[in-house]
Amino acid sequence: MPAYVIADVEITDPRAYEGYKPLAIEAIKKYGGKVLARGGSVLSLEGTWKPGRVVVIEFEDAAAAHRWHSSEEYGVAKAIRQKASRSNVIVAE
């Protein structure tokens, strides 16, 4: 069953965050992920959630998403993202 990594990101250091993007994309591709949505406009349909930058990445399954998220390659990118933003990240099947 496909799994989706969904992130709500508030960028706090745009310059540093630029260094995250190419590293993240490379790691996503290596682990079979496909970016479905990244940073476009967001329209709230219900509730009070007001996300900043929304990212949705599709993986073959939850195990593949976990392998990517815990990989050495993504670890380098993740460290940059964590310093340059505040994020909430989930994986949903």
Image (cartoon, rainbow, N blue to C red):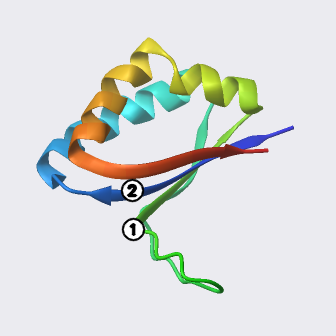
Residue depicted at 60% across the width and 41% down the height: 34
Q: In the rendered view of the protein, which quadrant contains the N terminus?
A: top right
Residue depicted at 52% across the width and 46% down the height: 89
**In the rendered image of this protein, does residue 16 appear above or below residue 60?**
below
Residue annotated with mark 2: 9
| Residue 44, position as x, y percentages in the image | 57, 83
Asked whether residue 31 appears in the rendered view, the answer is no
Residue depicted at 47% across the width and 51% down the height: 88
Q: Amino acid at mark 1?
A: Gly
**The quadrant where residue 33 appears:** top right
Which badge, 1 or 2, comes first in the chain's sequence? 2
Q: In the rendered view of the protein, which quadrant contains the C terminus?
A: top right
Give the CA distance from mark 1 to mark 2.
Answer: 6 Å
Residue depicted at 12% across the width and 49% down the height: 15
**The quadrant where residue 72 appears:** top left
Q: Nearer the viewer, residue 80 or 18?
A: 80
| Residue 8, position as x, y percentages in the image | 46, 58
Q: Amino acid at mark 2?
A: Val
**In the rendered image of this protein, does residue 92 appear above or below residue 71?**
below
Q: Nearer the viewer, residue 44 or 56?
A: 44
Q: Does 80 sit left or right of 62 as displayed?
A: left
Q: How many marks?
A: 2
Q: Are marks 1 and 2 in contact (CB under 8 Å)?
A: yes
